[in-house]
Image (spheres, rainbow, N blue to C red):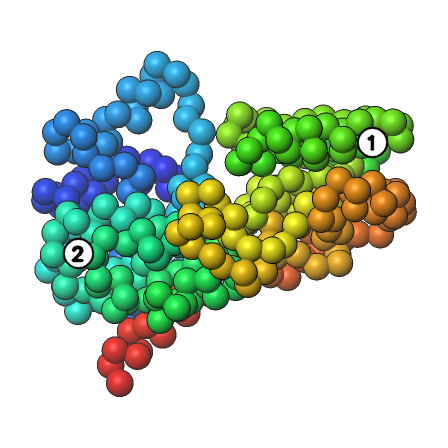
């Protein structure tokens, strides 16, 4: 039974009661040595009747086919997969257990409405990124300020710390045995143009996306385009298997899982990294002004590829990037294996959880 099945099949996931969730077995050497993590993940609240949040996705799947996996769900699935690999035990959505054990840590991932389901008396480990920004937190949830909150990268943590004093940085691991390199001889496309421009897309289509595409085609490169939110993971994986490099277009990223999946697949990335302030139009410039240096590739080094700031900078830097691609001068998968495996993500999460509990016992 995989992680998705466990979430759907677990009767303890109902906030109105239910039996204890099954415990994922620890490896023999770990029994009695590591605490069991209490994980809570919900993507949607009940809408019409208690528990209908479990039924609605099944109906949607029957009508529309396999659903697209959200970023938050991917984080949860990868965390569970990493915990399974390293033998760290955990429960999933066992509300009955956690209410009986207020002394144990509750690790709440996903949407913040879970905090409204009952009066949590446990120490909490919250996130990753339950809110886009701390200014969104309603006054009734002041408990967020008293607990440890996870965010995916350093720039996001610096933006949040003036509001949330106890912020920890935690990036989830990547499935490196799923996102694997394809031999160069089997590649048929030069460039995968990954379009994750989220705001003012029409403007950037004319100022950035199309000029880049035209430049690539004029230089004799074959181009495939994929747009965020309009593909399934299998489509993306197949595209990475065909493509020798990727141009990644996104205003900013808190982690950038799709980009890291490309790196794990051995695909060098030329990333639009404009820097500057956090420019989410729901917040900037009137609600939040953070000038601390936002990035679209917060996990990236010279092994991964190169960066550019605008269309002109792309055109001046493309030749050098492509020459290095052809020479095999990048090693993007090495970066992921050194920093972002499922196992490393799982151990890091556990270490943070353990430190939270140790601080409370001092």
Residue at horizontal 24%, vertical 31%? Answer: 54
Mark 1 packing: few (<14 Cα in 10 Å), some, or many (20+)? some
Q: Which residue reaches farthest front? A: 286
Q: Secondary structure at mark 1?
A: helix
Residue identified by numbered label 2: 140
The residue nearer to you, when weighing 149 against 335, is 149
Q: Secondary structure at mark 2?
A: helix
Residue 210 in the figure: left or right of residue 237? right
Q: Residue 186: where, in percent of width, then height?
A: 79, 30
Using the image, determine if residue 231 lies above or below residue 332. above
Residue 12 in the figure: left or right of residue 315? left
Dot 1 or dot 2, earlier in sequence: 2
Q: Residue 9: where, in percent of width, then height?
A: 25, 36
Residue 9 in the figure: left or right of residue 97? right
Residue 351 found in image quarter: bottom left
Q: Residue 241: where, in percent of width, then height?
A: 70, 33
Residue identified by numbered label 1: 215
Residue at horizontal 12%, vertical 33%? Answer: 50
């Amino acid at each position: 039974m995989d992680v998705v099945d466990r979430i759907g099949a677990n009767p303890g996931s109902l906030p109105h009661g239910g039996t204890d969730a099954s415990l994922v077995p620890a490896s023999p050497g770990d029994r009695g040595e590591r605490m069991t993590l209490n994980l809570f993940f919900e993507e949607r609240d009940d809408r019409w009747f208690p528990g209908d949040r479990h039924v609605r996705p099944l109906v949607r799947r029957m009508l529309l086919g396999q659903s697209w996996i959200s970023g938050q769900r991917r984080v949860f699935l990868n965390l569970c997969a990493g915990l399974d690999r390293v033998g760290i035990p955990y429960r999933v959505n066992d509300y009955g257990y956690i209410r009986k054990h207020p002394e144990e840590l509750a690790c709440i991932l996903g949407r913040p409405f879970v905090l409204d389901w009952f009066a949590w008396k446990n120490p909490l480990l919250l996130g990753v990124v339950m809110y886009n920004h701390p200014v969104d937190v309603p006054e009734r949830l002041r408990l967020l300020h008293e607990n440890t909150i996870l965010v995916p990268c350093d720039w996001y943590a610096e933006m949040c710390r003036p509001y949330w004093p106890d912020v920890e940085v935690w990036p989830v691991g990547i499935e490196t045995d799923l996102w694997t390199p394809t031999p160069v001889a089997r590649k048929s496309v030069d460039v995968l143009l990954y379009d994750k421009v989220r705001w003012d897309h029409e403007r950037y289509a004319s100022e950035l996306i199309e000029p880049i595409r035209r430049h690539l085609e004029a230089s004799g490169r074959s181009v495939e385009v994929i747009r965020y939110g309009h593909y399934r993971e299998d489509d993306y994986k197949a595209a990475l298997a065909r493509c020798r490099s990727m141009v990644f277009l996104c205003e900013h990223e808190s982690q950038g899982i799709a980009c890291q999946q490309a790196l794990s697949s051995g695909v060098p990335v030329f990333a639009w990294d404009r820097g500057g302030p956090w420019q989410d139009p729901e917040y900037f410039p009137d609600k939040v002004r953070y000038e601390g240096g936002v990035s679209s590739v917060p996990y990236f080094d010279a092994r991964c590829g190169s960066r550019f700031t605008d269309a002109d900078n792309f055109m001046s830097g493309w030749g050098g990037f492509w020459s290095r691609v052809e020479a095999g001068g990048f090693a993007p998968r090495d970066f992921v294996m050194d920093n972002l495996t499922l196992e490393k993500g799982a151990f890091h999460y556990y270490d943070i959880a353990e430190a939270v509990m140790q601080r409370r016992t001092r």
